[in-house]
Image (tube, rainbow, N blue to C red):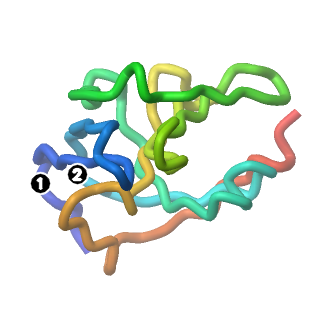
Amino acid sequence: MSARPRTPCAGSCHCGAVRFEITSDFAELTTCDCSICRRKNALMVKVHESDFRLLAGQEQLSAYQFHTFTATHYFCRTCGIYPFHRKRVTPDHYGINVFCLENFDPAGIPVRATVGAGMA
């Protein structure tokens, strides 16, 4: 399957307080087996920070870090939803929870399982 064209895609948390936009071709989606990703069960797309725009809700975001304190996972203070995180291995990228994207259907996009639990 060929990648989708690079187009903007809007997203938000459940209550709408946190709103953002990404641009991606959605070449692949990822899962992660680290302790937090396994629990939140997110399906993610990786985007460079230049392809991410926070439109609203900076003050509503709560940040969570653990282990090496490199990755930063963001949650809405109001509804508790995880919309995105700043990645550990590639800190100039975000992992976006595709279930927070408006009118997005992940069907047909390859999913790659990443190994986070084994990272030192």
Judge from the rendering whether residue 67 lies leftward or rightward of residue 65; answer left or right. right
- Quadrant the N terminus occupies: bottom left
> x and y percent of residue 23 in the render?
20, 40
Secondary element under disc 1, as helix, strand or loop, is loop
In the rendered image, the residue lying farthest to the front is: 78
Identified at 47% across, 41% down, the residue is 78
Residue at (34%, 50%) from the top-left corner? 15
The residue sitting at 33% across, 71% down in the picture is 106
Extreme residue toward the bottom, this view? 107
How packed is label 2: few (under 14 Cα within 10 Å), some, or many (20 or more)? some
Front one among 10 and 29: 10
Q: Image height check: is 10 above or below 57? A: below
Q: CA distance from mark 1 to mark 2?
A: 5 Å
Q: In the shown orientation, is residue 9 left or right of residue 37?
A: left
For residue 82, above or below residue 113: above
Label 1 crowd bin: few (<14), some (14–19), many (20+), radius 10 Å: few
Residue 55, percent from left and from top: 21, 28
Residue 25 or 105: which is nearer the viewer? 105
Image location of residue 120, percent across then percent down = 88, 33
Which mark, by number, is residue 74?
none
Tell me the kind of residue under disc 2: Asp
Q: Give the residue type at disc 1.
A: Pro
Of the numbered discs 1 and 2, the one sitting upstream in the chain is: 1
* Residue named by callout 2: 25
Q: Secondary structure at mark 2?
A: loop
Q: Quadrant of residue 66?
A: top right
Of the pair 70 and 61, the residue shown nearer to us: 61
The image quadrant of residue 94 is top left
Say whether marks 1 and 2 touch (CB < 8 Å).
Answer: yes
Q: Percent position (x, y) of residue 87?
A: 57, 31
For disc 1, the marked residue is 5
